[in-house]
Amino acid sequence: MAQSDARTFDPAEFKDGIRKEWREAAPGWHSWRATMETAEGGRAVSRTLVEQARLAPGQVVLDVGAGYGEPARQAAQAVSPNGRVVLQDIAGDMLALARKQLEHEAPPEVEMSFWECDAETLDLEPDTFDAVVSRSALMYFVDVTGTLRRLRAGVNPGGRLAASVWSSLDQVGFAAALPVILNSLELPPPPPERPGPFTLGDPELLASRVRDAGWVEVETGTVTVPWEFDSRQACTDFLRAVAPPVTALVADQPPEVRERVWQEVTDTAWGPFTRADGTVRLPNKAHWVSAVNPS
């Protein structure tokens, strides 16, 4: 999805682009799942969210932007037995991955439901859920506060929200490719107000969006998510497979330009993270927020 001037931003076009990009990225997420979901990597974020949501057996949980099934997998374990987890995502191909994976990993006594829809259009019945969890999804919302307000309407009084987002660009290892790509193609940086991976990277901004939506007892914290690769080339291959907002910047270029840009990424972006043996360790900082529904 190519970047354009903020004045021409079309929310419907943006949503269509999101669906397309994540549909195309679904096979890559499946292939690289083991790299992302290590105990100290992605699963550590999921574990933090489940802890902050204070889930208990028998509860009903909504995972917003559930992708390929995290943190829904750990949420299911926490609400077992007799709980229910609803996975929502705008991309059906990602939900298909989640359904297949959770057939083997979710406790059999927990009901799993799958909603393919836009989280920003959800109209929840009051007191439907005990908690809402969300990993790396809020920053793609056009109206973050409005969506969080609508989600709160479906949560029981005293129910909880626990969500995570990526930090600012300079605190996320995989984002080191972005300035290399922008410089190589002589592109301007995305407008800061445009939905995207790093737009909620300031924890104070994240907390304010949650408070403005009517949640209370808002707290924030940070988790560092390391990803490890055998080589710089493997790191670039990973990014090309799983990061549509980044790869979309290159997608419309002629083949020779695409390959030149990706070679620059391989040669330049991962240098600070490359160890003496040639392996790469990317530290990626994520912020979490937790809150309570007061009404």
Image (tube, rainbow, N blue to C red):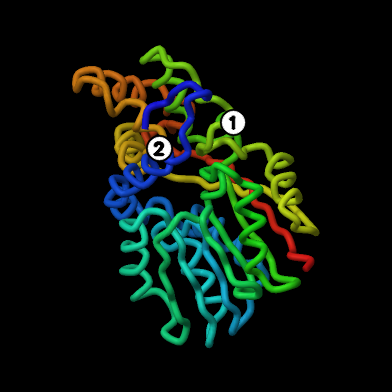
Residue occupying image coordinates x 70% and y 39%: 205
Residue type pointed to by label 2: Glu
Q: Quadrant of the N terminus?
A: top left
Circle nearer the N terminus (1, 2):
2
Is 104 in front, or is 112? 112
Q: In terms of secondary structure, where does tag 2 sit?
A: helix
Q: In the figure, is residue 20 to the left or right of 273?
A: left
Q: Quadrant of the C terminus?
A: bottom right
Question: x, y percentage for residue 273?
Answer: 47, 32
> Where is residue 132, by image quadrant?
bottom right
Q: In terms of secondary structure, where does tag 1 sit?
A: loop
Distance between the Cα atoms at labels 1 and 2?
16 Å
Is 14 in front, or is 132? 14
Question: x, y percentage for residue 243?
Answer: 38, 40
> Where is residue 96, by image quadrant?
bottom left
Residue type pointed to by label 1: Glu
Q: Which residue, given by chain and number where applicable, does mark 2 sit on? A: 13
Residue occupying image coordinates x 50% and y 73%: 85
Residue occupying image coordinates x 39% and y 59%: 68
Q: In the figure, is residue 184 to the left or right of 207?
A: left
Question: x, y percentage for residue 64?
Answer: 52, 59
Q: Which residue, given by chain and number where applicable, does mark 1 sit on? A: 193
Residue occupying image coordinates x 40% and y 32%: 246
Is 94 in front, or is 33? 94
Question: x, y percentage for residue 50?
Answer: 60, 66
Is 55 in front, or is 264? 55
> Where is residue 75, by image quadrant?
bottom right
Assess whether mark 2 and mark 1 are in contact (beta carbons under 8 angstroms): no
Residue 154 numbered mark, or none: none
Compared with residue 226, is residue 42 higher up or lower down, i.e. above or below? Answer: below
Q: How many marks?
A: 2
Disc 1 or disc 2, which is closer to the eye?
2
